[in-house]
Structure formats: C-alpha cells, structure tokens
C-alpha cells in the first residue's frame, strides 16, 4: 500500500469537492446511493459496496447501519472509487480473501485520511484512541490507522507532547 498515493488522492478529492459532504461528492460523481436488499448473500458481512457499470454507478449500504457508521462507510466506499476505480466491491467476496483484505485496508486508509486531519492527535492530546473515536463518531480502527500512517518524526513529536503533558499532570 502506498500511503503517500492515498494521501494525495484524498488531498485532490478535498480540493476538487471543497466544502461538500460525502453524499454531495457521490452525487457529483453521478452515483446513486441506495440500500442492500436483505436477500443479498453477504448482508451480514457487508456494511457497503459500490457498483460501476456503463449504465449504473451506485453505492449500496447495509440498511442496519447507524448514522455514524453511514459517513464512515460512505467515505470507505469513496476510497474504493478513487483508489480502486476498476473494481466493483459488490462482488468483492468472490475475490481472493488476501486480495480483499488489501483492498479493504486501502479503502479504510483513504477513509482515515479523509476524516481525520493530520493535526488531530495534537488537538486532542489528552484523549485515548477510543475516546477520540467516540468523540468524532468514527471507529477506533480508523483512528489507529491514521496514527500508524503518520511519519515517524510526527509520532515522536506526539510522544514527547504526551509525555510532557502526562508528567505535568502527575506532578500536581
């Protein structure tokens, strides 16, 4: 996975769709947003997928998602659209599981980069990953991905800030 390529795609999407919601971006891309049918064979395993044909471009969502999950799943699917433009995730379960895991990680990485600014850990230095995820209404998985994809220098800088804040707090 090329994190820099994914970060660049996120930057370009944000630049070309500045101020727009994920739903508005999908509309700009001529995607229809709908829901998976309960008869879809992978309904219990699938939060969302996309279909791209010559006649249809659609994102289908699991109808059982809560509001917070909707934004995360839509952003994940947007990642597939930009990072995997020639893959229909509607049929992703028919692909090799190792390859699927790779594709899903890239789409999750896109979502983490899109939903979380680079300075998010500095803004909320006093929060754990779980607390930050809860505050922002996203999964801990995306918060951890964002942190893991920071440069080593940035991680060291955050570690120093955390240690200084934690030490100051404990000395009171």
Image: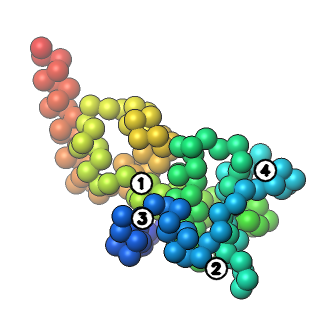
Does the residue at mark 4 contact the one at mark 3 (Cβ under 8 Å)? Answer: no
Nearest to the eye among marks 2 and 3: give it. Answer: 3
Q: What's the residue at 83%, 50% (across, down)?
A: 38
The residue carrying mark 3 is 20
Q: Is residue 113 left or right of residue 105?
A: left
State the CA–CA distance, disc 4 to disc 2: 23 Å
Residue 142 in sight in this render: yes
The answer for how far apart the CA atoms under marks 1 and 2 are is 24 Å
Residue 86 is tagged as 2
Place residue 31 in its image quadrant.
Answer: bottom right
Of marks 4 and 2, which one's residue comes earlier in the chain?
A: 4
Q: Residue at x 22, y 54 (%)?
A: 153
Callout 3: helix, strand or loop? loop
Give the alpha-carbon distance from disc 4 to disc 3, as whole Å: 29 Å
Query: For the residues carrying marks 1 and 2, which lies nearer the camera in this image?
Result: 1
Q: Earlier in the sequence, mark 2 or mark 3?
A: 3
Question: Eyeballing the image, is 77 above or below 52?
Answer: above
Local SS, label 2: loop
> Which of marks 1 and 3 precedes in the sequence?
3
**From the viewer's perspective, is the residue at label 4 or at label 3 nearer?**
3
What's the distance in space between the residues labelled 1 and 4, CA to CA? 25 Å
Q: Is residue 108 left or right of residue 95?
A: left
Which residue does the image show at 41% across and 41% down from the upper left?
Answer: 136
Q: Quadrant of the C terminus?
A: top left
Q: Are marks 2 and 3 in contact (CB under 8 Å)?
A: no
Q: Which residue is mark 1?
A: 115
Number of other residues with Cα within 10 Å of mark 2, as a class: few under 14, some 14 to 19, many 20 or more: few
Judging by the rendered image, the residue that carries numbered circle 4 is 43
Q: Which sits earlier in the primary sequence, circle 4 or circle 3?
A: 3
């Amino acid at each position: 996975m090329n994190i820099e390529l994914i970060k660049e795609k996120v930057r370009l999407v944000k630049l070309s769709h500045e101020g727009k919601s994920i739903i508005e971006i999908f509309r700009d891309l001529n995607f229809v947003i709908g829901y998976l049918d309960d008869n879809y064979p992978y309904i219990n395993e699938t939060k969302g997928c996309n279909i791209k044909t010559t006649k249809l471009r659609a994102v289908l969502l699991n109808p059982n998602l809560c509001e917070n999950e909707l934004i995360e799943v839509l952003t994940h699917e947007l990642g597939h659209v930009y990072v995997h433009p020639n893959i229909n995730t509607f049929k992703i379960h028919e692909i090799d599981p190792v390859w699927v895991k790779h594709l899903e990680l890239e789409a999750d990485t896109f979502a983490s980069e899109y939903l979380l600014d680079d300075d998010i850990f500095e803004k909320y230095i006093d929060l754990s990953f779980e607390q930050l995820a809860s505050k922002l209404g996203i999964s801990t998985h995306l918060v951890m991905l964002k942190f893991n994809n920071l440069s080593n220098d940035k991680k060291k800088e955050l570690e120093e800030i955390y240690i200084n804040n934690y030490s100051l707090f404990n000395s009171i």
